[in-house]
Image (tube, helix red, strand yellow):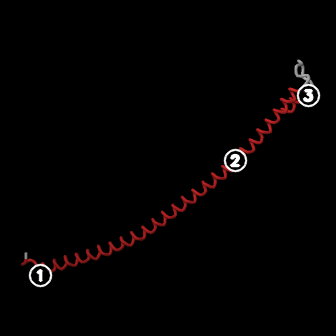
Amino acid sequence: MIAFALSPIGRRLLGALAAFALLLAAYAYVDHRGYARAEAHYKGVIAAEHAAAAAEAAAETERQVAANNAAKAREAGRIAEMQAQAENLQSQIEELQREASEDPDAGRVALGAPGVQRINKVR
């Protein structure tokens, strides 16, 4: 083996092998540095995308809270309006019942003018 390494063909072959190993080492070093740069770049890109997604999620949550609060306010207004209408109807019913109980013709078979007027108020 040593005799082959010392022969002219052996020296050339070993020289070519050493040059190839050097080229391979240089390629591996450059390839690793490129990979490291790409890794750092894309980690930054991914971090920016995560931050943007978190900001969008927070904005959507705020929008939903605002929409829910507005809907609750509309609902509370509508409930108050319905309660006022119910109280108004209740007072009308009580007034009509009072008028009906005071009507002197309440026991008659036919309706009198005050009874017809009370019915028309209900419409």
Q: Quadrant of residue 14?
A: bottom left
- Provide residue 95's location: percent of width, then percent of height: 84, 33
The residue at 69%/47% (across/down) is 76
Q: Nearer the viewer, residue 9 or 27?
A: 27
Looking at the image, is mark 2 or mark 1 earlier in the sequence? 1
How dense is the environment of label 2, judged by Cα within 10 Å: few (below 14), some, or many (20 and up)? few
Tag 2 secondary structure? helix
Q: Where 91 sits versus 37, above or below?
A: above
Pair 1/3: label in front: 3
Q: How many marks?
A: 3
Q: Quadrant of residue 103?
A: top right
Q: Amino acid at mark 2?
A: Ala
The residue at 26%/77% (across/down) is 23
Q: Nearer the viewer, residue 18 or 55?
A: 55
Looking at the image, is mark 3 or mark 2 earlier in the sequence? 2
Distance between the Cα atoms at labels 3 and 2?
39 Å
Q: Amino acid at mark 3?
A: Pro
Q: Amino acid at mark 1?
A: Pro
Q: Where 30 sits versus 84, above or below?
A: below
- Name the mark on residue 114: 3
Left or right of 35: which side holds 102?
right
Q: What residue sits right under mark 2 in the picture?
A: 76
- Name the mark on residue 8: 1
- Provide residue 70's location: percent of width, then percent of height: 67, 52
How dense is the environment of label 1, judged by Cα within 10 Å: few (below 14), some, or many (20 and up)? few
Tag 1 secondary structure? helix
Q: Is residue 66 visible?
A: yes
Q: Nearer the viewer, residue 48 or 102?
A: 102
Pair 2/1: label in front: 2
The residue at 54%/58% (across/down) is 57
